[in-house]
Image: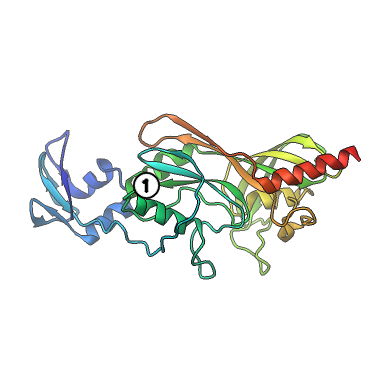
């Protein structure tokens, strides 16, 4: 059980309203706490129980409820404060355990890191990226912060990527708008569909090579495989992305990197911008492409 002293600006408030408004919990999070059990001054409480200033809440939080196995691994931390941690995920790593990837995931490493830091909370993610995409992933350190980020930070979130694509787009800057399927086909691909969800990707050509180019990308929506679908549809699939028609002769995974993520901090109400440098395999790819120009 965890003690919490009620502080109210008004004389009375229902418990469910207090959990959502004063403790900044989502409706789901508030109901979950009520389900696990809350007492007011030693007596069982309900959602419509009325609170007064100075009441003592005893909350059964069930903090460490995830079953993720802790696993010691090197984690590249890009930013950390009392509320969140941002890490640089390498390619070929799954973010969260799945049926086929129960260990070696980013969540396994974070569970170990949380345990070492005495952070008795489940590992939660504010954003996720594909196994073979590298770059920034943000992890709230508590259910409260996760809820706040969903409510206040998500609307201000800006995601920027870098990708190496086949060929050189005719327009050096562009905006791609389309509807993308909400479910994959039998091959695991998302596709353009009149019944899909609206997606917007903006791009700019940064460097041109003999048969490829480096793009800066900004996504205005967060659909699954959005950048990969849009660039393939543009006729310039990402190198290494064989699922969407990319050539993997020079790199064995999609040359896509989550390079910058900025948002309004859910507690400090200030703008946070986190950046990640291109990983070694994409740098080697670019080096080879530049050498081709000299030959």
Quadrant showing the N terminus:
bottom left
Q: Position of residue 252 (x, y in %)?
A: 72, 57
In the rendered image, which quarter contains the C terminus? top right
Farthest residue toward the left?
42
Q: Residue at x 39, y 30 (%)?
A: 269
Q: Residue 49: image x %, image y %?
A: 14, 51
Q: Is residue 178 visible?
A: no
Residue at 66% x, 55% y is 194
Q: Secondary structure at mark 1?
A: loop
Q: Is residue 129 visible?
A: yes
The residue nearer to you, when weighing 115 against 134, is: 115
Residue 98 image point, x, y percent: 50, 66
- The residue beneath circle 1 is 141
Relative placement, left or right, of 150 versus 251 is left
> Is 37 drawn above or below residue 170 in the view shown?
below
- Which percent across, then down, holds residue 251? 74, 53
292 horizontally vs 84: left or right: right
Q: Point out the residue furthest to the top here.
A: 270
The structure residue drawn at horizontal position 40% and vertical position 56%, both measured from the top left corner, is 111
* Side of 3 where 85 appears, left or right: right
Q: Dot 1: few (<14), some (14–19), or many (≥20) neighbours within 10 Å?
A: many
Q: How is the image coloured?
A: rainbow
Q: How many marks?
A: 1
Q: Nearer the viewer, residue 256 or 234?
A: 256
């Amino acid at each position: 059980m965890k003690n919490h002293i009620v502080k109210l600006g008004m004389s009375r408030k229902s418990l469910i309203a207090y959990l959502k408004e004063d403790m900044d919990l989502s409706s789901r999070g508030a109901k979950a706490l009520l389900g696990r059990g809350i007492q007011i001054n030693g007596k069982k409480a309900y959602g419509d129980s009325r609170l007064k200033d100075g009441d003592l809440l005893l909350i059964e939080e069930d903090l460490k409820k995830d079953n993720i196995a802790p696993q010691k691994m090197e984690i590249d931390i890009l930013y950390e404060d009392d509320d969140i941690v941002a890490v640089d995920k390498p390619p070929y790593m799954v973010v969260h355990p799945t049926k086929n990837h129960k260990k070696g995931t980013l969540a396994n490493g974070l569970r170990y890191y949380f345990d070492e830091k005495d952070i008795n909370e489940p590992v939660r993610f504010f954003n996720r990226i594909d196994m073979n995409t590298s770059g920034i992933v943000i992890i709230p350190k508590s259910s409260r912060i996760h809820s706040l980020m969903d409510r206040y930070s998500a609307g201000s979130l800006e995601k920027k990527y870098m990708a190496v694509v086949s060929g050189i787009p005719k327009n050096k800057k562009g905006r791609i708008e389309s509807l993308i399927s909400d479910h994959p086909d039998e091959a695991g691909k998302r596709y353009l569909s009149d019944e899909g969800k609206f997606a917007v990707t903006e791009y700019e050509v940064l460097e041109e090579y003999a048969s490829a180019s480096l793009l800066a990308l900004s996504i205005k929506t967060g659909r699954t495989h959005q950048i990969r679908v849009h660039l393939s549809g543009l006729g310039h699939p990402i190198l290494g992305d064989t699922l969407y028609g990319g050539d993997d002769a020079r790199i064995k995974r999609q040359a896509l990197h989550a390079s910058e993520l900025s948002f309004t901090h859910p507690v400090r109400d200030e703008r946070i911008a986190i950046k990640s440098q291109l990983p070694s395999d994409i740098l080697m790819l670019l080096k080879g492409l530049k050498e081709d120009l000299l030959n």
